[in-house]
């Protein structure tokens, strides 16, 4: 059996994003008999607000589903601009350093894993691992530096050069590096990393719990939607990178000619209030809050098609983790992506791909699904098959464990 220490800024009870995968990985390892500890922050995502029952300024430990979880103080900006995000990550790097060192020296894990975000904390994780002879693994959920500048959160060319050099040093300091898509893996190679050091370990979905159900769900009833209405669903974070305003523009364009087409935006994030203001008074745009895991399958089944808007600047910086669940629901997806991006490669055959930033193309694709039921059924069926082939939870978690045993090798106690 292995001792594994995971250091990551996001963990349960946050409901979406990286927290879900960190939590499920650790709990799966613990259920298999491994000793697992986590160093993380209080929950705050995607609302960027720490709940009242968590203390932002205190350290705390608790056992959660056989995983020992240590929470450290963190600065959480209410409006996360580029500079404030840097301070946010820096605060976690600072407060997590002591617990990382203590766990490495006293508890002596076989493997210490850092999950990015945040790269700032990863630097110290790699340093401690080298000094104590512990194997180290960095898992990249996105490219923080590239995304911050490509999306305009940070703009200084001098700062970008400094941060890229910092990123390069961190990447080279780990024994193993993984990321979530083939395109992101190739980006790592362009950063000068040897292929032997790299692994693709994509995010997963429990395909058994997201089996498509009747589209006449309670969500449709609560929103006053009729059985004859066609529903497009976006579920996830409402932040800068998505371009969710394009959905509202497409809705405005279609309202007169297709009043039966409705759009449901489910989730939370720093841009939600702005989106609600933008769609104020629109009868065809609806908002839902974050839903618990037990409602996830029914939420996905509410849709006739799913929407994955994405700014062009974010291409191949991240593969949306929600894609596996969308496919597993057996509904087609309309994704905004360039033709040569990883997202487009994943979606072709299981949905429609339109140009990023083009709300007219989005509206046209929606009309295509509205007018061609056979196409919609075929794409939805292909999506379900693709989820099972590429995104199945059991297969991916088994691969995680095998790779961890391999890297730990003879160092296991």
Image: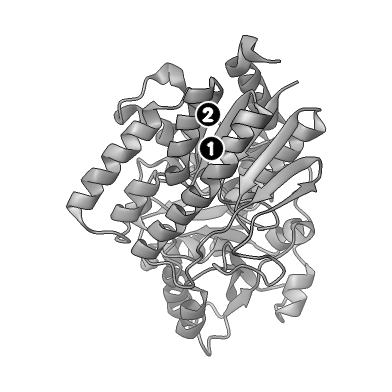
Q: Secondary structure at mark 2?
A: strand
Q: Residue at x 48, y 77 (%)?
A: 275
Q: Residue at x 18, y 50 (%)?
A: 158
Q: Residue furthest bottom?
A: 281
Q: Residue 287 placed where, x, y %?
A: 61, 76
Q: Is residue 127 visible?
A: yes
Tell me if mark 2 has few (under 14), some (14-19) or many (20+) residues whose alpha carbon lies within 10 angstroms of its own.
many
**Figure check: 131 above or below 321:** above
**Figure check: 72 above or below 250:** above
- Compared across the picture, whether 83 is left or right of 373 comes to left
- Compared across the picture, whether 229 is left or right of 362 comes to right
Report which residue position mark 2 lands on: 137
Q: Nearer the viewer, residue 92 or 277?
A: 92
Q: Residue at x 45, y 31 (%)?
A: 127
- Compared across the picture, whether 401 is left or right of 141 comes to right
Q: Secondary structure at mark 1?
A: strand
Q: Is residue 381 visible?
A: no
Quadrant position of the C terminus in the picture: top right
Q: Residue 375 placed where, x, y %?
A: 57, 51
**Figure check: 107 above or below 140:** above
Q: Nearer the viewer, residue 63 or 252?
A: 63
Tell me if mark 1 has few (under 14), some (14-19) or many (20+) residues whose alpha carbon lies within 10 angstroms of its own.
many
Q: Earlier in the sequence, mark 2 or mark 1?
A: 1
CA separation in Å, label 2 and label 1:
6 Å
**Figure check: 209 above or below 294:** above
Q: Residue 377 placed where, x, y %?
A: 64, 51
Figure quadrant of residue 245: bottom left
Pointer 2 with pointer 1, Cβ within 8 A: yes
Quadrant position of the N terminus in the picture: top right
Figure quadrant of residue 193: top left
> Mark on residue 114?
1
Q: Residue 12 placed where, x, y %?
A: 69, 53
């Amino acid at each position: 059996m292995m001792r594994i220490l995971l250091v990551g800024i996001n963990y349960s009870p946050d409901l979406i994003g990286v927290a879900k995968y960190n939590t499920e990985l650790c709990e799966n390892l613990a259920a298999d008999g491994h000793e697992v500890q986590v160093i993380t922050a209080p929950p705050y995502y995607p609302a960027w607000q720490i709940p009242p029952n968590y203390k932002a300024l205190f350290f705390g430990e608790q056992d959660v589903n056989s995983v020992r979880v240590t929470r450290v103080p963190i600065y959480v900006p209410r409006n996360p601009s580029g500079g404030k995000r840097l301070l946010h990550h820096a605060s976690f790097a600072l407060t997590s350093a002591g617990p990382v060192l203590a766990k490495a020296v006293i508890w002596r894990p076989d493997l210490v894993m850092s999950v990015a975000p945040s790269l700032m904390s990863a630097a110290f994780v790699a340093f401690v691992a080298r000094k104590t002879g512990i194997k180290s693994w960095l898992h990249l959920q996105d490219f923080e530096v590239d995304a911050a500048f490509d999306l305009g959160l940070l703009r200084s060319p001098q700062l970008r050069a400094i941060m890229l050099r910092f990123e390069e040093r961190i990447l080279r300091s780990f024994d193993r590096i993984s990321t979530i898509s083939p395109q992101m893996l190739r980006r790592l190679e362009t950063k000068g990393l040897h292929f032997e050091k790299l692994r693709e370990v994509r995010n997963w979905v429990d395909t058994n719990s997201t089996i498509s159900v009747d589209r006449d769900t309670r969500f449709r009833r609560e929103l006053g939607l009729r059985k004859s209405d066609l529903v497009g669903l976006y579920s996830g974070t409402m932040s800068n990178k998505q371009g969710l305003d394009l959905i509202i523009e497409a809705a405005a364009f279609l309202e007169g000619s297709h009043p039966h087409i409705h759009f449901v935006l489910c989730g939370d994030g720093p841009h939600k209030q702005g989106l609600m203001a933008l769609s104020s008074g629109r009868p065809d745009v609806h908002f839902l809050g974050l839903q618990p895991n037990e409602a996830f399958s029914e939420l996905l089944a509410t849709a006739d098609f799913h929407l994955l808007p994405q700014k062009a600047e974010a291409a191949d910086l991240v593969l949306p983790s929600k894609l596996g669940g969308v496919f597993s629901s057996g509904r087609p997806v309309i994704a905004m992506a360039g033709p040569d991006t990883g997202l487009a490669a994943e979606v072709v055959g299981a949905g429609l791909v339109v140009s990023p930033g083009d709300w007219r193309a989005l509206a046209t694709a929606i009309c295509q699904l509205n007018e061609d039921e056979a196409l919609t059924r075929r794409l939805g069926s292909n999506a379900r098959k693709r989820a099972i082939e590429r995104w199945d939870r059991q297969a991916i978690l088994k691969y995680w464990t095998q790779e961890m045993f391999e890297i730990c090798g003879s160092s296991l106690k």
